Amino acid sequence: MKHIDSTEKVGWLSLDAWSETYLGAHWIIKNKLPEKPNQAEAVDGALSQMVLLASHQLVEIMLFGCIRSNLKQSGQLNEVLDEVLKRLSFNEAFNKWPKLLMGEPFPKKTQPFKAARVLAARRNATVHSESALTTLEMARSALYTGVMASRAVQTHFESGPFYYEAALAKYPVEERVWFSEDMYP
């Protein structure tokens, strides 16, 4: 599938939910958000929130995709289980399903899993309860965490190269500090 975008030149990358979400968040960081907080305009807080939400969505897309793929490959996916997955919360999927399917839980006290849990909590605060603000630093850290956590989730469920190496090679994520509560405004 050929995608042409005059600003990003996506070209021949085959896009899906994960890669489109990543490219959108990457584009916001590279083309819209200023480097320094003192250069920020009012809209940059909203754009930073969008990057934070997208970054968590990367982890969510990868987690549910790996669970579904594992169940399908093992012949366990049926209509009832498919309905269960549609209603499954991120936290329940993250906390229980890796052990159920792989025999080992995520090592949640190590990075990037630790940062992914903080990112999920902040995403929930942003969307549901607090309308939590997001800084430029948080947005950049969230994207880095979302990509690295996605890679770690896939590695936990299967071996082989990360599905999105081509997208990351063309649009590399900048290395940042892990997302943490220390950066909340």
Image (spheres, grey):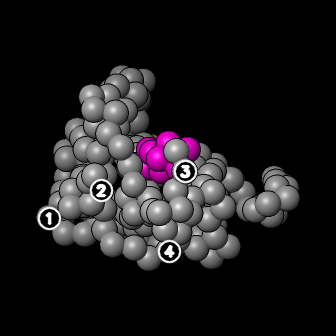
CA neighbours of label 4 inside 10 A, class few (<14), some (14 to 19), many (20+): few
Of discs 4 and 1, which sits in the foreground?
A: 4
First-in-chain label (4 vs 1): 1
Q: Which residue is mark 1?
A: 109
Magenta region: 43-53
Q: Which residue is mark 4?
A: 174
Q: Amino acid at mark 3?
A: Glu
Considering the numbered disc 1 on the image, is that residue within a helix, a strand or a loop?
A: loop
Q: Residues at badges 3 and 2 in contact (C-beta under 8 Å)? A: no
Rendering coords of residue 121 (x, y %): 25, 44
Residue under the point 52% across and 45% down: 42
First-in-chain label (1 vs 2): 1
Residue under the point 40% across and 63% down: 137
Say above or below: 141 vs 4.
below
Rendering coords of residue 86 (x, y %): 40, 28
Residue 116, numbered circle: 2
In three-dimensional space, the C-alpha distance between marks 3 and 1, rounded to whole angstroms, equals: 36 Å
Q: Amino acid at mark 2?
A: Ala
Rendering coords of residue 26 (x, y %): 58, 60
Rendering coords of residue 159 (x, y %): 41, 70
The main secondary structure of the magenta stretch is helix
**Nearer-the-camera pick, 40 or 117:** 40
CA neighbours of label 1 inside 10 A, class few (<14), some (14 to 19), many (20+): few
In three-dimensional space, the C-alpha distance between marks 4 and 2, rounded to whole angstroms, equals: 17 Å
Of discs 3 and 4, which sits in the foreground?
A: 3
Of discs 4 and 2, which sits in the foreground?
A: 4
Residue 47, numbered circle: none
